[in-house]
Amino acid sequence: MSNFRHFSGNLGIRNLFINFKFITGISLTLSTFAISFGGLKAADKLQKSLLNHTFKLPLIYFYDTPSGIVLNRFTNDIQTIDTLLPINFRDWTSTAFTVISIFLLFSFQMPMIILFLIAILVVYFFILSVYITSSRQLKRMELNSMSPILSHFTESLNGKSIIRAFKNQKL
Amino acid sequence: MAKLQKIFPGNRKIRLFFRVIHGNPFFDFSINDLNEKQIMNLKEINRSVILFCSSDFYLKNFHFISLNSTIEVESGNDCKSLQTKEQMVTGNIGFDVYLKYLKCVQPSYLVWILFMNFIFQLTSLYSNVWLSNWNDALGNEQYFKLFIYFLLGLAQCE
């Protein structure tokens, strides 16, 4: 009973605290919504431009390039744009803002910490430069290695009558 | 490779292609340059299914349609390949690529995202500051409750 009375006395302060948490939740939700819609818009725009450019290509292109390359653009790359890019963008923005706020708060509270933060930044930059080069190249190699498989599927599907005619179903 | 060069003498670049040209009007398939036995030989070497042999007299290239992979046998003559290889970009991604994506995300959404993230950080930081102020203003009796709040916060940490 005494606890209840105590809480009711500080109702204004408590409400303000709850309001802060409420605004935090609302802003996080709205930013996530904005990123989702923006990512969808971007994916739509990029896919449409890819489709337009592919349709306007000269016919010799489709003879020259294996169909797997074209298919790879329309499946793997579009999937990356659709799903991976907005999620990574959201993570990046929230992490960047968190880091900036932490840095600002620390340096306001005790300016001597800036030296330590710079040291940490150097270490992190080194790790980033080592990690991101190999990760990026691996991702590219993975994407490129998908193309022959896709061409294999589509072309054996196209030529299935020929495969059947020569009785070469078993590889 | 050596076996293939034995089968195809002369200065010709022979390519085994990874595609089935099915009903293409630009190329008529003929097996006049090869006989059945040679194709069978290729089959043994390649461990793949060779379905057709087409000869394009323009490019002086032989296209063997196989279900394996692209195999090149070069023998001096520099004929151009019909098929283009997939290019792979190396090096770091320039800022213009990011800018292109951000332009596709539309600036109105972008402003909204940044502003909301800013508000989120501000409020989440200030709510903690407010909690500490609140704690300072209170008497000793509230410390136990705040200790429970602290424990809950500790449990939330990853």
Image (spheres, coloured by chain):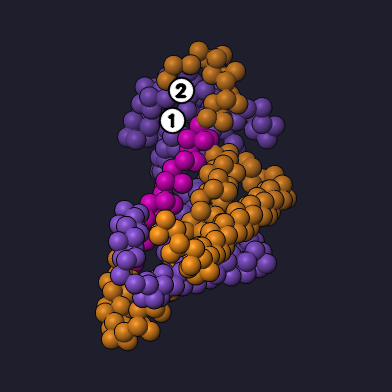
| Magenta residues, start to end | A129-152
- Density class for disc 2 (Cα within 10 Å; few <14, some 14-19, many ≥20) is many
Q: Amino acid at mark 2?
A: Val
Q: Are marks 1 and 2 in contact (CB under 8 Å)?
A: yes
Q: Color of chain B here?
A: purple
- Give the camera-side residue of A169 and A109: A109
Q: Is residue A154 left or right of residue B42?
A: right
In the depicted structure, whether residue B147 falls above or below residue B51: below
Dot 2: element: loop
Majority SS type along the magenta span? helix
Residue A150: image location, x then y, percent: 52, 35
Query: Which residue does the image show at 64% across and 46% down from the upper left?
Result: A61
Residue B23: image location, x then y, percent: 66, 27
Query: Which residue does the image show at 32% across and 34% down from the upper left?
Result: B2
In the depicted structure, whether residue A58 falls above or below residue A22: above
Q: Amino acid at mark 1?
A: Asn
Q: Color of chain A here?
A: orange
- Give the camera-side residue of A80 and B150: B150
Q: Quadrant of residue B11?
A: top left
Q: Chain of mark 1?
A: B
Q: Which residue position is annotated with label 1?
A: B68
**Residue B31 is covered by the magenta coloring:** no
Q: Chain of mark 2?
A: B
In the depicted structure, whether residue A160 falls above or below residue B110: above
Residue B13: image location, x then y, percent: 46, 41
Q: Pick the quarter of the image with the N terminus of chain A.
A: bottom left
- Give the camera-side residue of B101 and B127: B127
Q: Which residue position is annotated with label 2?
A: B49
Query: Which residue does the image show at 59% across and 36% down from the upper left?
Result: B56
Q: Is residue B60 left or right of residue B2?
A: right
